[in-house]
Image: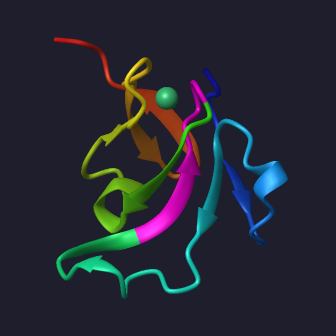
Amino acid sequence: MIGELDVLSEWIPEQMRPGAIFVLENAGSVGEKDDPYWAVLSCPSCGTLGLITRKQISGLVPVICGSGNCSVQFFIRDSEIEVRKPF
Ligand SMILES: [Zn+2]
């Protein structure tokens, strides 16, 4: 599990290693109005790519990996990853 995000300034699929994040060019204009999609994140644990929203990138809502055999949950704190402890 990677503990820090690697912010990419360009969309380079080969560099989307676990923990890499790329802010969408049309960030804020896709998805729900009050919480639009903002970036593509490679799961810091398994590397599965997923879209994250503005609330997730600002740490208000946890990110949950979409992969069925991972399902890790974490918060984004600036560029750090804070794993959500199970209750
Ligand atoms: Zn994962």
Given the current orientation, which residue lies at the most extreme front position?
A: 68
Image coordinates of residue 57 in percent, x first then y, are: 42, 58
Tell me the quarter of the image containing the N terminus: top right
Image coordinates of residue 59 in percent, x first then y, are: 34, 50
Which span of residues is magenta-colored? 38-46
**Residue drawn at (19%, 82%) of the image:** 33
Whether residue 36 sits left or right of residue 52 in the image: it is: left
Location of residue 7 by image quarter: bottom right
Tell me the quarter of the image containing the C terminus: top left
Establish if 72 lies above or below 8: above
**Residue drawn at (64%, 40%) of the image:** 19
**Residue drawn at (29%, 41%) of the image:** 62
Whether residue 72 sits left or right of residue 34 in the image: it is: right
Establish if 44 lies above or below 84: below
Residue nearer the viewer, 80 or 62 = 62
Image coordinates of residue 64 in percent, x first then y, are: 34, 36
Image coordinates of residue 29 in percent, x first then y, are: 37, 88
